[in-house]
């Protein structure tokens, strides 16, 4: 699966809007009271993607060793 290059960041004018590493608009999060919090959650999750994949691979390998 291809995704927009990271790191992503939040622009607050007229935001919050999420932008990719090259300044491309990814998501417009305006309109809700909790829009800044939602935008932060999306950006943090996207930026942690590789770390999360590596943690999952370690967990899978550990489970495989424990289950004969």
Image (spheres, helix red, strand yellow):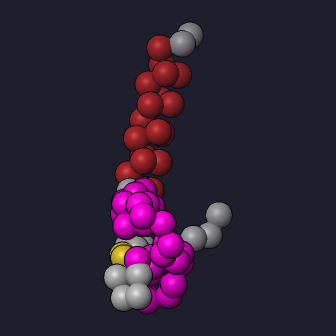
Q: Is residue 30 left or right of residue 47?
A: right
Q: Is residue 4 left or right of residue 14?
A: right
- Where residue 9 sits: x, y (%)? 36, 76
- In terms of depth relative to the viewer, which is nearer, 15 or 23? 15
- Where residue 58 sits: x, y (%)? 42, 35
Residue 36 belongs to magenta span: yes
Hey, which residue is sitting farthest top in the picture? 68
Residue located 47% across and 14% down the image: 66
Image quadrant holding the C terminus, namely top right
Quadrant housing residue 13? bottom left
- In terms of depth relative to the viewer, which is nearer, 2 or 47? 47
Quadrant housing residue 6? bottom left
Residue located 41% across and 88% down the image: 14
- Where residue 50 sits: x, y (%)? 43, 56
Image quadrant holding the N terminus, namely bottom right
Residue located 53% across and 22% down the image: 64
Total labels: the figure holds: 0
* Magenta part of the chain: 16-45
- Where residue 12 sits: x, y (%)? 34, 82
Q: Where 43 sits versus 25, above or below? A: above
Camera sees residue 55 = yes
Residue located 42% across and 64% down the image: 33
Camera sees residue 46 = no
Q: Where 2 sits versus 65, above or below? A: below
Residue 8 belongs to magenta span: no
Hey, which residue is sitting farthest right in the picture? 1
Q: Where 45 sits versus 29, above or below? A: above
Q: Where 62 sits versus 26, above or below? A: above
């Amino acid at each position: 699966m291809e995704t927009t290059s990271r790191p992503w960041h939040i622009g607050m004018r007229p935001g919050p809007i999420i932008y990719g590493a090259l300044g491309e608009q990814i998501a417009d999060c305006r309109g809700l009271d909790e829009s800044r919090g939602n935008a932060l959650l999306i950006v943090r999750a996207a930026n942690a993607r590789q770390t999360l994949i590596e943690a999952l691979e370690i967990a899978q390998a550990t489970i495989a060793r424990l289950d004969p």
